[in-house]
């Protein structure tokens, strides 16, 4: 099957500063593809080059089989871009904004269907400026979908949203995927990348450092696992820290947490220590590594790791 996006050795610099360096990657049709990286890594530059809003200095960008350099207009008809809510005319009512943006496209989505999809039906007569940030973000999402796009680009879709609004945003992204759309999302929230994305690209200083499923990235790089349990009075912190595999110890209220790079040996040592010191291990929980650790591993102090 044709890829949704293909980048071949894409390069872009501002002045003498390279922002995106020889980037080669592909985004598959129908996947949720995440782009993560520290501030200034080049995420926005990358995504805006794919959208045709910035021009690459060299390399090829193919979107839905079309060349961004030569067929940008045709591409724009088939992609949707989440605008920052500040770019929406905010004195207008939601329904008016949707009508205005619909008029830009030859075959827009049915507005009733779109507002039902995003639960916006009750907000159609409200002024955009009176909405909370979560609802404004829904309006932005409606505008990104108004041309019924094959690919939707979401640059930090849940920035500034409270945890509930963020979860709702994730649910909407899932539903867009179920409809068969390809979603490209940049985010600073590793939980978002881990929960939402089929594959994630990690970029740092304009270079692609790793691209894989969150599970594989975590298995390869999210090395430490967490063992947490109920703390007992007799526990010796020093002895816990000294157990084989323990990288760090967290001590919070009633609970102790051991981050370990050798779960089996740490568990063995933990049970032995409990027996030696005369306490029992209770409320034991084992947790896998996370995208947070992958991110730190790959980007910490500009460290570069090949995967
Ligand atoms: N229009 C521009 N002119 C000059 N330099 C720019 C411009 N846009 C971005 N840069 C620089 O290019 C680099 C990459 O910026 P970019 O905005 O693409 O990164 P980012 O990963 O999206 O960052 P953030 O997470 O902070 O949004 C940064 O060093 C930034 O200062």
Image (spheres, helix red, strand yellow):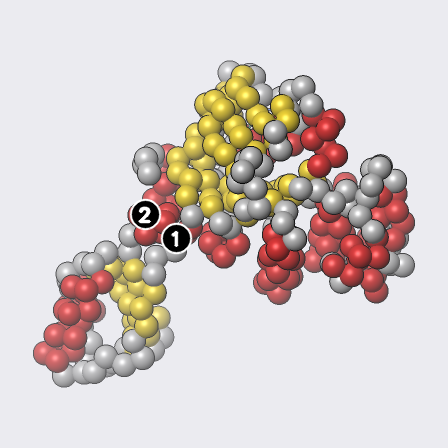
Q: Residue furthest front?
A: 1
Q: Is residue 161 visible from the viewing direction of this image?
A: no
- Residue 224 x, y percent position in the rendering: 28, 56
* Disc 1: residue Cβ within 8 A of ligand 1's nearest atom: no
* Upstream in sequence: badge 1 or badge 2: 1
- Residue 3 x, y percent position in the rendering: 54, 35
Picture quadrant where residue 15 is located = top right
- Residue 51 x, y percent position in the rendering: 65, 32
Instruction: Tell whether 70 sits left or right of 272.
Output: right
Q: Which residue is mark 1?
A: 215
Residue under the point 43% across and 30% down? 207
Indicate the quadrant containing the C terminus: top left, top right, bottom left or bottom right.
top left
Q: Is residue 178 visible from the viewing direction of this image?
A: yes
- Residue 271 x, y percent position in the rendering: 16, 75
Residue 14 image label? none
Residue density around tag 2, few if under 14, some if 14–19, many if 20 or more, within 10 Å = many
Residue under the point 34% across and 65% down? 287
Residue density around tag 1, few if under 14, some if 14–19, many if 20 or more, within 10 Å = some
Residue under the point 42% across and 40% down? 211
Instruction: Tell whether 213 sits left or right of 29.
Output: left
Q: Which residue is mark 2?
A: 221
Q: Nearer the viewer, residue 121 or 271?
A: 121
Indicate the quadrant containing the N terminus: top left, top right, bottom left or bottom right.
top right
Kind of element beneath mark 2: helix
Which is closer to the viewer, label 1 or label 2?
Answer: 1
> In the displayed structure, would residue 243 be above or below residue 196?
below
């Amino acid at each position: 099957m044709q890829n949704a996006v293909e980048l071949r050795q894409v390069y872009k610099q501002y002045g003498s500063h390279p922002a995106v360096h020889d980037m080669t990657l592909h985004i598959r049709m129908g996947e949720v593809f995440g782009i993560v990286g520290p501030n200034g890594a080049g995420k926005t530059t990358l995504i805006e080059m794919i959208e045709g809003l910035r021009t690459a200095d060299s390399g090829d960008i193919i979107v839905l089989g079309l060349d961004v350099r030569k067929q940008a207009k045709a591409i724009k008809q088939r992609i949707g871009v989440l605008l920052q809510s500040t770019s929406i005319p905010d004195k207008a009512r939601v329904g008016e904004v949707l009508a205005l943006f619909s008029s830009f496209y030859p075959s827009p989505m049915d507005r009733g269907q779109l507002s039902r999809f995003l639960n916006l039906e009750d907000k159609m007569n409200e002024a955009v400026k009176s909405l909370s940030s979560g609802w404004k973000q829904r309006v932005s999402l409606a505008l990104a979908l108004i041309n019924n796009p094959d690919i939707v680009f979401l640059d930090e879709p849940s920035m500034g949203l409270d945890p509930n609004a963020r979860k709702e945003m994730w649910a909407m992204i899932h539903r867009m995927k179920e409809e068969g759309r390809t979603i490209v999302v940049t985010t600073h929230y590793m939980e978002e990348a881990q929960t939402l994305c089929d594959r994630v690209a990690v970029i740092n200083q304009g270079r692609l450092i790793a691209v894989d499923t969150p599970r594989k990235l975590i298995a390869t790089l999210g090395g430490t696992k967490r063992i947490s349990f109920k703390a007992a009075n007799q526990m010796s912190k020093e002895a816990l820290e000294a157990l084989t595999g323990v990288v760090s110890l967290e001590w919070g209220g009633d609970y102790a947490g051991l981050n370990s790079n050798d779960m089996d040996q740490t568990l063995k040592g933990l049970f032995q220590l409990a027996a030696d010191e005369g306490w029992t291990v209770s409320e034991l929980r084992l947790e896998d590594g996370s995208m947070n650790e992958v991110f730190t591993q790959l980007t910490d102090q500009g460290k570069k790791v090949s995967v």
